[in-house]
Structure formats: C-alpha cells, structure tokens
Amino acid sequence: MKRPMYIQKSKSCSHQRDLNNSSVNNRPNNRSNPLKRGISFRGVKERLKEVLSEGEADLFRGGWERIGDVLIIELPEELESKKLLIGKEMHAMFPKIKTILNRKGITSKFREPETEIISGKDTLTVHKENSCLFKIDPTKVMFCAGNLAERARMAAISAPDETVLDMFSGIGQFTIPMARHSNPRKIFSIEKNPVAFRFLNENVKLNKLDNVETILGDCREVSPRGVADRVVMGYFVRPERFLRPALAALNGRGVIHYHDLPMRNEVERRADDLISTINSSGYDAQIITARVVKSYSPARVHCVFDVECSRRDGRDGGMMGRRDGWQ
Ligand SMILES: C[S@@+](CC[C@H](N)C(=O)[O-])C[C@H]1O[C@@H](n2cnc3c(N)ncnc32)[C@H](O)[C@@H]1O
C-alpha cells in the first residue's frame, strides 16, 4: 500500500531581521530613525508616507532583501516615477547599505536578475551566511534569500567519505557551505554561465576550500560519470531534462536532491512521476524527504525531493570522466 508522503515545510527566515540586528549609529538626518527601535516593514512604510502620498506608500508591499551591503527591493510599476525618491529615503534609513537595487524580474536562460540601481552605485559585495563568504554582484547573478534554510540543510547533509556533484552551482550557494561544513572528499561543481562561474571560483578561493573542482559548461555535457554518492540538482526549470546525467553521475547508488516547481496541489503526483521516471531508467528509487523550499507564486511551490536511487543491475553509472553529452 502506498504511504502518504510527508512534506516538510521550510522554516521561514527573515532578512529583515538581519537588518534589525545591524548596529547603526550615524543617523542620516534628524527624522526618527527606525533602525534604533529595530526596523520593520511598517517602519519603512511610515517613513515613506512622509514623502509619498498615502496611496503611493500603500503600493510599497514587497519588503526587502539584503545581500552583503546591497539592499534589493521590488517596486510596482505604479511607483516607477517615485523610485529615486524611495531609493534616497530608504538609503537614509539604512546608512550601512551602500547601494539599493530595484528588481524587475529574472531572465529565463541563466536565471539572471534584471535590476536597476535606485540609490548608490557600487554593486559588488561580499555576503556572509552560515560562516561562509559569497562574493557576488546581485545585478549579475542570483542569490535567493528564500533558499536560506535549504542552503543550511545542504551544508550539513554530506559526509567526509562522500563525492558530490553540484550540477547547477551558481556562485556556489550549495557547494560552498557543503564543502566547508560537511567536508566531503570532493565536490564537482558545474556552472554554465561564465559570469556565475567566475564568482564560483572566487568563492572557492575566498573560503579556502581545497575539496572543490569547478567545471564550466552544460552539466548534460560535462558531468562526470560513476563517481558521485550525492547529486544536487538545484535548478527547477524543467529539471527532468537533467535526470539522466544525474543518475549516470552516481556511483551505482546514492541520493539525488531534485528541485522542482509543481502546482501546489500536485506535489505528490510530481513525486510519483519522478519515481516512475527513475525506475524506467533502470534504478530503484524512493523519496526519503520532500520539502517545500519556498512559495514561488500563488499557484506553485519550490520543492526539493531527496531521492535514494540504486541501479538495479548493481553497476556504476559509467566510466569516470567520460563526458559525451546527453540530449
Ligand atoms: C537559479 S541558479 C541556482 C544556484 C543554486 N543551485 C541555488 O539553488 O541557489 C541556477 C544556475 O544553474 C545554471 N544552469 C542552468 N542550466 C545549466 C546547465 N544546463 N548546466 C550547468 N549550469 C546550468 C544557471 O546558469 C544558474 O547559475
């Protein structure tokens, strides 16, 4: 009989709290400084009411994200003509922040952010999280605040005798904390966007890691085979396209962390489909954990399925280093 799947909910994490904790002494001007009493979304809104009409201030709904000393907000189109005013006002409230960006969207190909500077000018920063340093330019590459709990989980999930493949490394969001805190024997870390790849390499150096091998390219073409105990598939755009190289990377058996973007009411069905697809590739598979990483849209959730896989014929995935491509 099929057991009902237990879906873990992500622990919420607030970047607003990061800002609350930052100690700020120099007041930008003599108006009330909400950082002194711990800044809140409401505090920002109240302050904006001093320079916007009540109706305009009410349109400011998104909150903010802090990456290093860069602050990112998302303004609705209706506030386009007020964006510089809002930037200036918020900068005065957060004097330790060097630049404020307005995020307009994300491109689909490399999932690059589309942003514009609304206050300040330098966007290169170093973000510290979970004792790891991430050099990043948030105008060029993504760093998703909502994935914080998942990054912390991944940091502790591996072990010193493991070999790991991170197929969609980005700037090292999973590779860096895992390499540092779980200390696996080796992490193969693949990224196809040259800009993100450059940051990935810098972050390996910045964190003084010697167990990471970075590889530039499409993971369908450059993934090693038959080596991994664990594969991280941290990219949810039609992830089924990448399942075959993920399975082939396993050393016959291991765990795949499969990220996906199902409709809210279809999580369990997606998990069943995933198991069927893996089974039809000659592997036994079972889901050991299903987690909601974050809410993605009113209709969809970002999920991660941890799937234990073992090849039925007992062989490994293929020759180490053979990288002849997948379609
Ligand atoms: C949204 S980022 C996620 C980074 C990280 N895994 C995380 O979850 O925070 C996805 C990354 O995968 C990269 N990517 C997309 N398709 C790829 C492919 N076929 N091979 C290698 N990297 C790819 C993108 O360039 C991007 O940097």
Image (cartoon, helix red, strand yellow):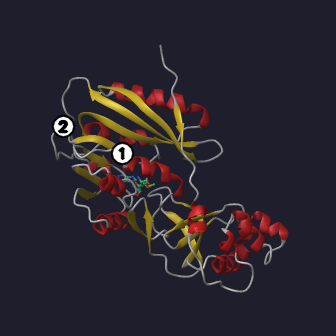
The three-letter amino acid code for the residue at tag 1 is Val
Instruction: Find the distance from the CA under tag 2 to the CA under tag 1.
Output: 19 Å
Q: Report the front residue among 9 and 298.
A: 9
Relative image position of residue 43 (x, y in whole percent) = 73, 68
Q: How many marks?
A: 2
- Residue that extends furthest to the right in the rendered view of this protein: 54
Relative image position of residue 243 (x, y in whole percent) = 35, 38
Can residue 191 be seen at all in this image of the molecule? no
Which disc is residue 137 wearing?
A: none
Q: Vertical placement of 180 versus 271: above or below?
A: below
Specify which label sits upstream in the sequence, 2 or 1.
Answer: 1
Figure quadrant of residue 180: bottom left
Figure quadrant of residue 114: bottom right
Relative image position of residue 3 (x, y in whole percent) = 49, 20
Q: Name the secondary structure under disc 2.
A: loop
Label 2 vs label 1, nearer the camera: 1
Q: Name the secondary structure under disc 1.
A: strand
Q: Vertical placement of 69 versus 204: above or below?
A: below
Instruction: Report the residue marked by disc 1.
Output: 232
The three-letter amino acid code for the residue at tag 2 is Gly
Q: Seen in the image, is 148 located left or right of residue 210?
A: right
Categorize mark 1 by other alpha carbons within 10 Å: few (<14), some (14-19), many (20+): many
Disc 1 within 8 angstroms of ligand 1 (CB):
yes
Instruction: Report the residue marked by disc 2.
Output: 318
